[in-house]
Amino acid sequence: MPFSPLYRPRVDLLSFLRSRLSQKIVLSIFGSIVVIEALILIPSVIRRQQELLQGLALQSSASLKVAMVDVKTTDEVVFPEQLLAKLSRLEAIPIVVGGSLYDVRGNSIGSFGEAPTMTFTDFSDVEDVADSFVSNFNPRADRYEVAQTFPLVGIPHWVVINHDTTSVRREVRAFIWRIFGLVLLISAVVTLTTMVVLRAVLISPVLALNDDLLEAAPAALNEENATMYAFKSLRYRHKKDEIGAVIGAFQQMFERISTNIAQRQQAEDRLRESENRFRTLVEQAAESIFVLDEHAKILDINRFALNSLNYERAELIHHNLFEVNPAFTPQDYDVLWRRLQAGNPVTVESIHRRKDGSTYPVEVRANFMVMTGKQQALALVRDISDRKQAEKAQARLAEIGQLAAMIVHEVRNPFTTVYMALSTFQTMDLPPRGKMRLSLAMEESERLKRLLNEILTYSKEQKLVEERIEINDLSKELLRSLQELPAATDKTIQLITQPEPLIVKGDRDKLKQVFINLVTNACEAISPKETVTWQLQRAFGEHVFQPPTSLQSNSTQHVKIQVHNGGDPIPPEVLPKLTQPFISTKADGNGLGLAITKRIVEAHGGSMTIGSSVEKGTTVTVFLPLVIGDPVLEQSR
């Protein structure tokens, strides 16, 4: 995934200080340093205070020695009042505010100045009287009392000196402030150093990664710009620590997620497009489409079905099929559902009922499907009203055909007798008027005979005596006979064959009838000296004419027979009906020739079309399927 190498994220101090992680880390470091320094400060203050107090004690002890230096240590009697008076000289020292004197037995000799609070009972339990030292510090009263033994006139005495500790308190406070300032300075320097290092090493990458995480979701969902998005944390992806690993993992995760989302969006778009296309096809289908569940509930229905039934979608969705198909019962549907589940498509004829109560016949083709994990039935419903009417018309035509055949048979017997009688009259010597009438009668009898034969031919089912027929040879064989017909007199028939064999499977006599009928009609439609073109060629299903489904697929090969003449065009209103019985463009035609020809062609699995215009003349085109796999045909290829 390409990113801009020139991008540099900016993490300012304000955002750094607003970072809760940085606040916690900085406060933790600062607090830890303060606590550590406090733990170091308290013993230092206590030690400093002890040093100052000891200094007071040493100073007063030295002064005591100076004050008692002239006390005789001889046998001269020295009164206790003299000792106390000597001791009171210590009041001249600013730090001494008072004192008291005890003999070794604990008898109080006296005190001076501010009497100490310590008494002999506070130090009477000292075992080693010599060089003993007992102190009592009262910070609230700024007093420090020291009891020590001191030899006076050769006898140990307890001297208790009460010191003023105001200077000690000031010095201790000053010491505390000095240490506190030093602690703050050290804490500030360490904290600022930590902030700088932490910002570069941890906080800036984390904040950049945080911004990237907020932008990752919309960037990944933006299919067009996802692969071009420049993340802020990229500058840190080469760090050889956990931050670099996390950022690298994030980049890989984003690439995979964005790719996956893009692929999924494309798949969803394709699926949505496919669904829309399928929905459009279903809605535009020219047949009714129903989607049903196992309880015959209508889950979906297309617009064609709604229009056919005159319902709105909301009126049928989730309603029962039996509301529109009264001929179907729940038992019938259960049987149909089981057949569909077994994988057997079902085709049945039934009736549908419109909203106004009217009904029409339908053909239902149902199949089984599973959609979104649910079993459903897909039913294609076709209105077969026209087919039913056509079937009735066909049945009626069949009855008419049978009746026509019966009438022809009944007419032919007396007609044969009449025809034989007229033929007998031709051998007699008749007057001119009688001969003229006999000639007219014979002509009409011949025409009636042909009509009766054609009616019989058309009414009968086309039964083929099939064999392999080479169309080139058959056409050449017929050409000589066709050129001798009265209709071809003074006219040219041009036959265009193919050098390769064109083999079909069919009835030779009936195919001859087809070619003779088409070429004769073409000759009758043109003037003398004009030409009828009879052309044979190989063709595929997609050429010129789309064969019906019975003619295999579009890849099936056919022989295309075209008979063209340049006579007067067939009127457009007559052209579509020209192959129907009793429709003809000739004054003396009965309209059965082309109808019989078309039935013969269709019986061979082929088709026939007629095209006519002033510019191109009239062309009759016949398609017949070629034999596939014929050894001669394969060799020719």
Image: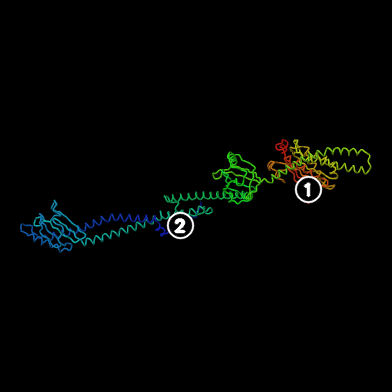
Total tally of numbered discs in the picture: 2
Q: Position of residue 494 (x, y in %)?
A: 81, 44
Q: Foreground: 71 or 400?
A: 400
Q: Position of residue 22 (x, y in %)?
A: 39, 56
User: Which residue is under mark 2?
Assistant: 9
Q: Residues within 10 Å of mark 2 (few under 14, many from 20)?
A: some
Q: Foreground: 180 or 597?
A: 597
In this rendering, which labeled residue sits more in front, label 1 or label 2?
1
Q: Quadrant of residue 345?
A: top right
Amino acid type at circle 2 is Pro
Q: Quadrant of residue 30?
A: bottom left
Residue positioned 81% across, 50% down in the render: 568
For residue 507, the mark is none
Q: Position of residue 522 (x, y in %)?
A: 81, 45
**Considering only order in the chain, which callout, 2 or 1, is on the residue closer to the N terminus?**
2
Q: Position of residue 218 (x, y in %)?
A: 50, 54
For residue 618, the mark is 1
The answer to whether the residues at label 1 and label 2 have Cβ atoms under 8 Å apart is no
Specify whether 561 is left or right of 127. Answer: right
Residue positioned 16% across, 55% down in the render: 134
Q: Spot the residue most to the front.
A: 357
Amino acid type at circle 1 is Thr
Q: Is residue 27 visible?
A: yes
Query: Eyeballing the image, is 294 above or below 204?
Result: above
